[in-house]
Image: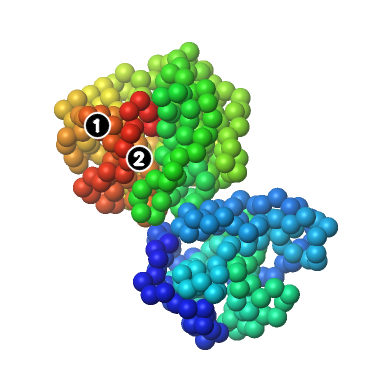
Amino acid sequence: MKRILVALSAAVLSLAALQAPSAVAAPPTPAFGAAIDRYATYVGQTTCDPDAKPGVNGFRDLLKAEYGRADLGMVRACGTGGQSEHKEGRALDYPFNAANSTQAAQAQDIINWLLATDQHGNAHALARRFGIMYMIWNHKIWKAYEASQGWQSYSGASPHTDHIHFSFSWAGARKQTTWWTAARSLSAESVNGDRYDDLLAVSPDNVMRLYPGTSAGTFGGSSEIGPGWSASFNRIGVGDTNADGFADILATDTDGSLHYWHNSGRGTFTKLANGGSGWQTLEWFAVMDVNGDNRADVVGRDGGRLYWYPGEGSGKFSSRIFIGEGWATYPRFAGGDADGDGDGDLWATNAAGELWFWEGNGNGTFSSGREVGAGWSGFTGLNVLDVNGDAKADIVAVRASDATLWRWSGEGDGTLATAVQVGSGWSGYRPAAY
């Protein structure tokens, strides 16, 4: 979320200001259709299941990526206090201090963004798309189930002047609302479930590391995923195989076996049973959602022939389907959603350093290729991902001459903006996919 230009004092956060929200600044938001979720009805705590739910985790990660502060809590022990959605893992307390002008402005920013009317005339659009049941901030409460009354006075034990409390419907907590379901294809390579695709790379000491994408189109500081990623894993791809909103990892071994690591949604991956054997004939592959069903597929090159392996979920794939031939001249390719229509498109480089683009038709076929760039001979790898969450896939690659990392922002039609350097010191790293 962009910082708003004028710092608001805590005094400005009056009831009148909160009742007439307008999105002063906002993170990249997908171009939703007119269909939208109903307002969340009130469903209070009925059980105790203090495990943070994926929609709450995802919303928290979106805020943390922008503001950089840890949350103040999502879960609460069953025997603590009275009734609370925290005890079901569907509430979030995120720090905004009303006495701090910067944080007060940030609070106004997120409130305006959630409660703004969208281009289709849907009031409180994003609060509905996230499944927010109510919010409490600075002596006020907004209730989705009494939305017409706007912000109301709140006199609970805590005035909520140091944080905003967000409570979610069960659909929102479970990532079943349209923010997640309608936009999932835009975050096919988001490891942490937010709007920004992340870059995975194997370091020279064979450790897999995560570089989180940001709204600025750059990457945050890396964190370790795990060791043991030796060169025997000769192809690695990243994508959401089971439509849960979190990107998983696929890799082939030199012995032809396919391996699958499930993303828990909590920053860890679990190695599950191998996804099959006989993959050694593939000289290159890309993980992408070819047909728009929100489950990542594999597109692989076997000699000069290209094949589609439809994803069945959880790292399993159907028998391959022939796509086309003549691909021996394109040793490297990668896929992603160039135009935000939900199905995958392809980019590839040839020996002359030209970049070519094929638009996906959503059924395993692609349009005729067209050249969209040149000068790619000096770059290693070809990673297609939506770094800045604008629903237009970008390309990231390493320049071999000086081991710098570069990003080409997607224009939405397969063409790319001028390259921007987004990192350095990448000598010996193997960014996935490769």
* Left or right: 32 in relation to 37: left
184 vs 62, nearest the viewer: 62
Q: Which residue is mark 1?
A: 402
Q: Is residue 152 visible?
A: yes
Secondary element type, mark 2: strand
Q: Which mark is residue 384?
A: 2
Q: Is residue 48 above or below residue 239?
A: below
Badge 1 crowding class, 10 Å Cα cut-off, few under 14, some 14 to 19, many 20 or more, is: few
Residue in view at x 44 percent, y 43 percent: 221
Residue in view at x 59 percent, y 81 percent: 151
Q: Position of residue 76 (x, y in %)?
A: 74, 57
Q: Is residue 116 above or below residue 374?
A: below
Q: Position of residue 65 (x, y in %)?
A: 47, 54
The amino acid type of the residue labelled 1 equals Asp
Q: Position of residue 223 (x, y in %)?
A: 50, 38
* Left or right: 153 in relation to 390: right
Secondary element type, mark 1: loop
Residue in view at x 53 percent, y 53 percent: 61
Residue in view at x 35 percent, y 50 percent: 217
Nearer to us: label 2 or label 1: 1
**First-in-chain label (2 vs 1):** 2
214 vs 283, nearest the viewer: 214
Q: Is residue 280 above or below residue 79?
A: above
Q: Residue furthest bottom?
A: 16
Give me the C-alpha separation between circle 2 and circle 1.
21 Å
